[in-house]
Image: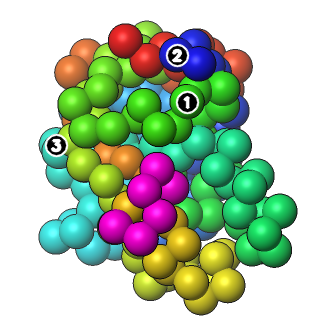
Amino acid sequence: MREGRVAQVNVSQGGVPKRPVLAARIGKLGLEGDKVRLTRVHGGPERAVCLYGLERIDALREEGHAIFPGALGENLTLEGLDWDLVVPGARLRVGSALLEVTKYAVPCATTAPFVSDDLKRYHQDHFPGWSRVYARVLEEGDVAPGDAALLL
């Protein structure tokens, strides 16, 4: 499963949840129209875009968590990719942008209500393969729901 699609594009004026938009431009520092509150832990060129898999969100919802796309602060909710392959160093063509995964995203306390106060549930150290990931932007581009998401 190296070919998927963009299920949702999400932005906020700071904090979570991030809300869906019809399309966005991905620049070197992230999606236009998106802001982060704590720049020492979020954002910047190495954490420009946050990604998460829709299948993981659906599985967490089935466990009883009040989660939905954008709730964990991901900018791009992707569908159809083998999330276990979306690891640091992986490159993805998402819409017309090229991204490179830089690191696993550590859970943020502001997301606790969406995961029944169990931040470990999507922490890479406790549940490998369930973490969101951060990516740097290698090539700027545009993205919209329905666009291809290809794991290169």
- Sequence order check: which comes first, mark 2 or mark 1? 2
Residue range corresponding to the magenta coloring: 125-130
Q: CA distance from mark 3 to mark 2?
A: 25 Å
Amino acid type at circle 2 is Arg
The image position of residue 26, as x and y in percent, is 38, 29
Q: Quadrant of residue 106?
A: bottom left
Which residue position holds label 1?
A: 82
Is residue 27 shown left or right of residue 32? left
Picture quadrant of residue 152: top left
Name the residue beneath numbered marker 3: 45
One can see residue 121 in this view: yes
Residue holding disc 2: 2
Residue for point 74% across, 55% down: 59
Which residue does the image show at 16% across and 43% down from the upper left?
Answer: 45
**Which residue type does callout 3 highlight?**
Pro
Q: Nearer the viewer, residue 118 or 51?
A: 118
